[in-house]
C-alpha cells in the first residue's frame, strides 16, 4: 500500500528532516540520547538494532504527537474559559477599566484611551519594555560589532569586496522607488508618532516605521548613505537621550501622582496636538528609541557596523 | 463583513500550516508576512486599530526584514553574490 504524499511529508517533518538541515534524522536523535544506551544499542546484532531503532522512532513520534495534542487541549480548554467576546456582562465588577474609560480623558488628557493606559496608567510597564529594547540593542552591538580584535584580514577583504560590488551594481529601480517612497514613509511615521495621543498608533508603531525607512534608505541608496548622517555619535546620543528623557518624565509623573502633589505639566485641551501632558514627549522618545533599535538590529546583523 | 472575517480566519490557518510544510525558506518568510497582514486586518475588524498598526509595522515589516537578513547570512540565495 502506498502512503499518501502528505503523510510522508508529515513524517519527514516530525522527524525534523528538512532541506536546510541536511543531517539525517537518525543522527540527530542519537546525539540527544545518553551515551550508555547508545553503546549497548550499537553492540547488539544488526537486525535487532535496526528494529529497536524503528521502535524508538515510532515511540518518539507518538510522544511528540501526544504532547502536541495535550498542549493543544490545554490551550483550547483555556480559551473555553474566556468570557464571550462582546458580551455586555463581561467583567462587570472591574472598576479599574471603568475608571480608565470614564475618567481617562480628564485625568491624563489624551483622546486615545489606549495611549492613556499604556503610557501613563501603566507607564512603568512600558518603561520596562523600552529598557528591554535598549538592552537588546546593546547586547546585539556587543556580540556582533566588527572591530580590530574579532576580524581577520580575510573578513575585512570580503566585506570591502561586497561593499564594492554593492556600489558597482547599484539597483536603479530600487533607488528611484526609494526616492519616491522615502518622504511618504517618513511623513507617515512622524504622523503616527506625533498623533499617538489623538489617533491609533504611538511611539512603538511610528518608531518601527521610521526604522523601516532608515533600512530602506540603506538598501536603496547603497551602503554608507545612512552612516553619513547617522553615525555612532548621533546614534548613541539619540538612543540614550531618548531613554533618559522617558525615565525622567515617568519618574516625575509617578512621584507626583503617588504623593498627591500638583502636576506642573499642563494637560492642554483634549484633541489638540499639544495636549495630554507627558504623552507627546514620551511618544517621541519611545519612537526614537525603537527606530534606533530596529536600524541597529539590521545593520549589526548584516554588516557588523552602523 | 462576517464572510470577510471567516475568509481571513481560514486564510490564517492555511498560512500557518503552509509555512511549516514549505521546503524553501524564502516562500516560508513570505507566507509568514501574509499571515501577519491578514492578522492585522483581523485586528482592524475587531476594532483594535492600535494593534493593527503595530502588527503591520513590526510583525510584517521589521520581522520580514530580519528574517530575510538571517537567511542571507546563511548564504541561502543561489545565483547572487550571497551564494557560498
Image (cartoon, grey):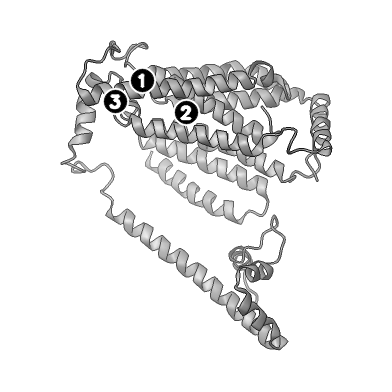
- Chain bearing tag 3 is A
> How many residues crowd around disc 3 within 10 Å: few (fewer than 14), some, or many (20 or more)?
some
Give residue A279's mark. Answer: 1
Give residue A205's mark. Answer: 2
- Residue A81 position within the rendered picture, expressed as x and y whole percent measured from the top left: 27, 55
Give residue A254's mark. Answer: 3
Compare marks 3 and 1 and give the one earlier in the sequence: 3
In the image: residue A29, left or right of residue A158: left
**Alpha-carbon distance for marks 2 and 3?**
25 Å
Can residue B56 be seen at all in this image of the molecule?
Answer: no
Give residue B2's mark. Answer: none
Can residue A174 be seen at all in this image of the molecule?
Answer: yes
Looking at the image, which is closer to me, A173 or A145? A145
- Residue A159 position within the rendered picture, expressed as x and y whole percent measured from the top left: 79, 33
Q: Secondary structure at mark 1?
A: helix
Query: What residue is rendered at 37% in x and 12% in y?
Result: A273
Q: Nearer the viewer, mark 1 or mark 2?
A: 1
Amino acid at each position: 500500500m502506498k502512503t499518501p504524499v502528505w503523510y510522508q511529508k508529515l513524517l519527514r517533518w516530525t522527524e525534523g528532516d528538512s532541506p536546510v538541515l541536511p543531517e539525517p534524522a537518525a543522527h540527530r536523535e542519537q546525539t540527544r540520547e545518553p551515551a550508555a544506551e547508545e553503546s549497548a544499542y550499537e553492540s547488539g546484532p544488526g537486525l535487532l538494532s535496526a528494529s529497536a531503532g524503528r521502535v524508538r522512532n515510532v515511540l518518539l513520534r507518538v510522544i511528540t504527537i501526544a504532547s502536541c495534542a495535550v498542549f493543544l487541549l490545554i490551550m483550547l480548554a483555556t480559551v473555553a474559559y474566556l468570557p464571550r467576546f462582546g458580551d455586555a456582562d463581561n467583567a462587570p465588577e472591574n472598576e479599574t477599566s471603568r475608571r480608565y474609560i470614564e475618567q481617562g480623558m480628564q485625568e491624563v488628557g489624551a483622546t486615545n484611551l489606549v495611549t492613556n493606559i499604556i503610557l501613563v496608567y501603566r507607564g512603568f510597564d512600558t518603561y520596562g519594555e523600552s529598557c528591554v529594547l535598549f538592552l537588546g540593542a546593546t547586547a546585539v552591538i556587543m556580540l556582533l560589532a566588527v572591530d580590530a580584535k574579532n576580524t581577520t584580514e580575510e573578513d575585512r577583504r570580503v566585506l570591502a569586496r561586497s561593499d564594492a560590488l554593492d556600489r558597482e551594481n547599484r539597483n536603479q529601480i530600487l533607488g528611484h522607488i526609494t526616492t519616491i517612497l522615502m518622504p511618504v514613509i517618513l511623513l507617515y511615521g512622524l504622523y503616527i508618532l506625533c498623533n499617538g495621543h489623538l489617533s491609533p498608533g504611538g511611539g512603538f508603531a511610528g518608531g518601527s516605521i521610521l526604522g523601516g525607512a532608515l533600512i530602506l534608505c540603506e538598501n536603496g541608496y547603497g551602503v554608507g548613505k545612512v552612516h553619513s548622517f547617522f553615525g555612532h555619535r548621533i546614534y548613541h546620543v539619540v538612543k540614550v537621550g531618548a531613554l533618559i528623557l522617558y525615565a525622567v518624565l515617568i519618574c516625575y509623573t509617578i512621584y507626583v501622582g503617588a504623593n498627591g502633589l500638583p502636576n506642573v505639566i499642563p494637560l492642554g485641551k483634549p484633541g489638540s496636538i499639544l495636549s495630554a501632558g507627558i504623552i507627546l514627549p514620551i511618544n517621541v522618545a519611545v519612537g526614537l528609541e525603537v527606530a534606533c533599535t530596529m536600524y541597529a538590529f539590521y545593520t549589526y546583523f548584516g554588516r557588523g557596523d552602523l | 463583513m462576517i464572510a470577510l472575517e471567516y475568509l481571513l480566519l481560514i486564510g490564517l490557518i492555511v498560512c500557518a500550516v503552509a509555512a511549516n510544510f514549505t521546503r524553501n525558506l524564502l516562500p516560508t518568510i513570505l507566507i509568514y508576512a501574509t499571515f501577519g497582514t491578514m492578522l492585522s486586518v483581523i485586528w482592524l475588524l475587531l476594532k483594535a486599530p492600535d494593534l493593527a498598526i503595530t502588527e503591520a509595522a513590526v510583525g510584517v515589516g521589521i520581522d520580514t526584514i530580519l528574517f530575510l537578513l538571517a537567511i542571507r547570512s546563511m548564504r541561502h540565495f543561489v545565483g547572487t553574490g550571497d551564494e557560498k
